[in-house]
Image (spheres, helix red, strand yellow):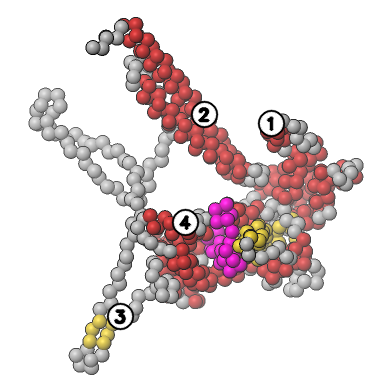
Amino acid sequence: MKRAASPDIDALRAALAAAEARARRAEAEASNAEAIIAALKLMVEKLRHELYGQRSERKARLLDQLELKLEELEANATEDELAAEQAAAKTSTVKAFTRRRPSRKPFPEHLPRERVVVPAPEVCGCCGSERLAKLGEDVTETLEVIPRRWKVIQTVREKFTCRDCEKISQAPAPFHVTPRGWAGPSLLAMILFEKYGQHQPLNRQSERYAREGVALSLSTLADQVGACAAVLRPLHDLIAAHVLAAERIHGDDTTVPVLAKGKTDTARAWVYVRDDVPFGGTDPPAALFHYSRDRSGRHPETHLRDFTGILQGDAYAGYNGLFKPGRSPCPLTEALCWAHARRKFFVLADIAAAAKRRTKTGKQGAIISPLAFEAVQRIDALFDIEREINGMSAEERLAVRAERSAPVLAELEAWMRAERARLSRHAPVAKAMDYMLKRWPGFSRFLEDGRICLTNNAAERALRGIALGRKSWLFAGSDRGGERAALMYTLIVTAKMNDVDPQAWLADVLARIAEQPARRLDELLPWNWKTAQAAKTLAA
């Protein structure tokens, strides 16, 4: 027979439970505070980014890090809150902790609503009377998702025979997006966007579809991707013509691993971006991608053989042939990227990174260069002016630059040449200075033309997807695969630049492109498609 617990033991257990509850509550409060601080920091950085633009080349990475940290802290705070509630339930002396969560936006109005009415009480819970009258109702909304549904559309074509002439009449065969196709346009758009927009290789897609009960082999999916690329090529060509008709384009390239015999080679993905927004242009932005097996200068010369205008980029020697006086039809105007030049000084002046290296290794990191730090400050003065005039017309930008930027640039050049004369040619900061001083006409050309931007960030943003995708798809399977990827990146990135949902756009384009007259093919371009969709929505 069990002995009854003594009052002292019961009191001790209650005290322990209360202590545990208080400890859990303290942990929950601390986690909640950390989450709030992280959310506020992220909000501040996003506001700075919106107000002042890209303040440094590390800003995008900083935002990603803050969002990841917030994600972890929010999860920790909720987990600790539930633990505190469970601990508080065991005692009557400690109040449970409840987090103050940020106000959630209401669910979108376009989502369908399904009413689930809880059965009303039949009698009064107080006196048992059946004389109840409805006063109103409280509605609690819960967001739910229906798992993806697959369906097979059967198109039936009935046959009829004529009793007079005995000829058979039948409606024409239905249109298929791809020759001998079996997939609908929405399915094809999803496959394409998952592969090239979300960086999900076809083998992973095949495995996921199989788990959903639809067996689509890798070769079957690849067959449809190749067919879609052929169908969409005319749109790619229209975008290419639009990009190369610009007065100024941004050019850049990045590495793309490509499968070779028993190894992977390093190929290149090139991008040329048309974006006239910085100087008040009204033409829609677009990006044109190319693929090549190497980084030879003959590739940009081929890509831009018909282009005449301003080329913004880094100091890649392969572009030099485009700027030669004898180039046909005419030499391009070179405009170099100040973000590239600033980065070389910034690395030498990054106090935070040097301190982090010291903490991690326990050794003295690279010495902070006062000259590099001053160079960054002087260059940032130019960026501050550019942020103020971003979006103005080319003429207005040029006038402000002549008045405010020209004196700053002249002082920067004089200071840099004077300091460079005192430095050894082996000094790291001397190399950063030489990078600019040897190419000074290209860096100072923004004072001559208001259409020129200070940076080449537009091209770098367009390449960001490839940089992320490399970690997922590892390598391109062949040169043809690289060329096909360049075509799809052109379509998807251009859609994103015009604030168009790439998957929805591709689905509609694939459903219509075969029947679209060639003279009206431009109606399917992302910016025209967006205008047409907005008009339909307004009319409805």
- Disc 4 on helix, strand or loop? helix
The local crowd at label 2, few if under 14, some if 14 to 19, many if 20 or more residues have their Cα within 10 Å, is some
For marks 3 and 4, give the one nearer the viewer: 4
Which sits earlier in the primary sequence, circle 2 or circle 1?
2
Question: Relative to 509, is 243 on the left or the right?
Answer: right
Which residue position is annotated with label 1? 359
Distance of label 3 from label 2 (alpha carbons): 67 Å
In this rendering, does residue 324 appear at all?
yes
Q: Is 170 drawn above or below residue 453 in the view shown?
A: below
For marks 1 and 4, give the one nearer the viewer: 4
Query: In the displayed image of the protein, which residue is found farthest to the left?
Result: 130
Quarter of the image where one finds residue 216: bottom left
The local crowd at label 1, few if under 14, some if 14 to 19, many if 20 or more residues have their Cα within 10 Å, is few
The circle on residue 278 is none
Which residue position is annotated with label 4? 204
In this rendering, does residue 445 appear at all?
no
Distance of label 3 from label 1 (alpha carbons): 76 Å
The circle on residue 34 is 2
- Disc 3 on helix, strand or loop? loop
Asked whether the beta carbons under mark 3 and mark 2 sit within 8 Å of each other, the answer is: no
Query: What amino acid is found at the position of numbered circle 4 in the picture?
Result: Arg
- Disc 2 on helix, strand or loop? helix
Q: Nearer the viewer, residue 285 or 142?
A: 142
Which sits earlier in the primary sequence, circle 1 or circle 4?
4
